[in-house]
Amino acid sequence: MSEPKGRCAVVTGIGVTAPNGLGTAAFWTSTRAGTSGIAPVNRFDAAGYPARLAGEVPGFVAEDHLPSRLLPQTDHMTRLALVAADWALQDAGAVPADLPEYGMGVATAASSGGFEFGQRELQNLWSKGSRHVSGYQSFAWFYAVNTGQISIRNGMRGPSSVVVSDQAGGLDAVAQARRQIRKGTGLMLTGGVDGSVCPWGWVAQLASGRLSRGDVPDRAYQPFDRAARGHVAGEGGAILVLEDSASAAERGAPRYGEIAGCAATFDPKPGSGRSPGLRRAIELALADAGLAPTDIDVVFADAAAVPELDRIEAAAIGAVFGPGGVPVTAPKTMTGRLYSGAGPLDLAAALLALRDQVIPPTVNVTPAAEYELDLVAGAARPAHLRAALVLARGHGGFNSAIVLRA
């Protein structure tokens, strides 16, 4: 389906809740310095589980940021999302009460959200023997809670949507928000904040076989490294404010960058003999942005830390840009994979990188030569940055790519 053209969607506000920094400034300071937020699980006793490390948002006390009436009807993940949305609006200088309520919308993503809420419902059911929404039902409808709570809290009655495509969902939500801006919506809150650091969520993630079982924080999550053994899970993410460029300029809003190109593809059935869809997603996003591969100055990788998946991603990047043809980074090695929150957090990092002309590092990784990547490892790298490419892949075959232009 073709999209309306002519309206340029720009990011005017960023709100971050991340394992290596609560708030955008704290996150970016840690990320530039290569400071990791991966540590032993603290939110529940994980001693009996084979995976015992996570990226947890530090120092977050919901009562310090939200009215008490919201606490009984929300879980940890939703509270993080509400606070990130508040911070994004403040950063953009946007006051919802001063804007047309039907001219504002919300498009977010969820993947592992609902586990904690569902677990709480099941515990109530088991302990009280009373009638409650079942865990599976709560999981199904909980996907919409973040969007609904953000909309209600800010009086946003414009377009609302929720995308569910695992780790790729955060980028897909931003692409959906861009479509709404192009259709005439004045402001969209978008992105994703996710989390499943609870016993039920942990068991579900272990079933994928992709969680790292390493116990040493700086050796557990090592994408593009011969020691790769799977990823570390995390919580948090980023909420972004998207606006039409002309409207943002009219009210003097800050502009971090433009959502210049978006694309999503789906991998073919295993055993079909057809190529994975990530390369095509990259090429389609570049075409949508009207840019050539030589116009991209940095790639923020999905970084699965599963050797087969790392090879697929490295091959796709190499096929488009040439072997070692573009700097590649994966700052999520400092946070863990945040599922639907990962892509938006990478977008936030990429926008801040464009602003400050520096590529944040991939930490704790010794790049394996066979991947033929120019991986920015160890320390941040100053660079002349005009455009960035952010990649995300979801379990089951989802691929998403977004091009940002300074």
Image (cartoon, grey):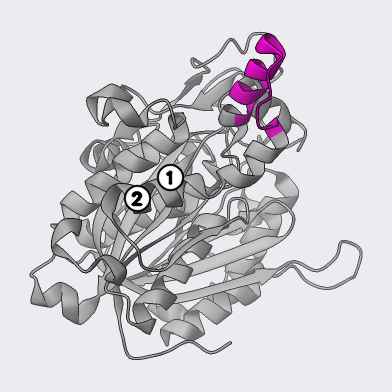
Mark 2 is surrounded, within 10 Å at the Cα level, by few (under 14), some (14 to 19) or many (20 or more) other residues, namely: few
Front residue of this view, candidates 185 and 39:
185
Quarter of the image for residue 137 reads top right
Asked if residue 126 lies in the magenta stretch, the reply is yes
Which residue does the image show at 74% across and 67% down from the upper left?
276
- Identify the mark nearer the N-term, 1 or 2: 2
Label 2: element kind? helix
Front residue of this view, candidates 151 and 40:
151
Q: Amino acid at mark 1?
A: Pro
Q: Position of residue 305 (x, y in %)?
A: 63, 42
Q: Quadrant of the C terminus?
A: bottom left
Quarter of the image for residue 107 reads bottom left
Q: Which residue is mark 2?
A: 152
Q: Nearer the viewer, mark 1 or mark 2?
A: 2
Q: Amino acid at mark 2?
A: Ile
In this rendering, position of residue 188 left or right of residue 97: right
Q: Which residue is mark 1?
A: 331
1 w.r.t. 377: above or below: below
Contact (Cβ within 8 Å) of mark 1 with mark 2: no
Q: Which residues are magenta?
A: 118-135
Residue that extends furthest to the right in the rendered view of this protein: 271
Q: Is residue 296 visible?
A: no
Q: Position of residue 293 (x, y in %)?
A: 47, 79
Q: Position of residue 279 (x, y in %)?
A: 64, 72
Which residue does the image show at 47% across and 30% down from the upper left?
75
Front residue of this view, candidates 223 and 43:
43
In this rendering, position of residue 295 left or right of residue 54: left
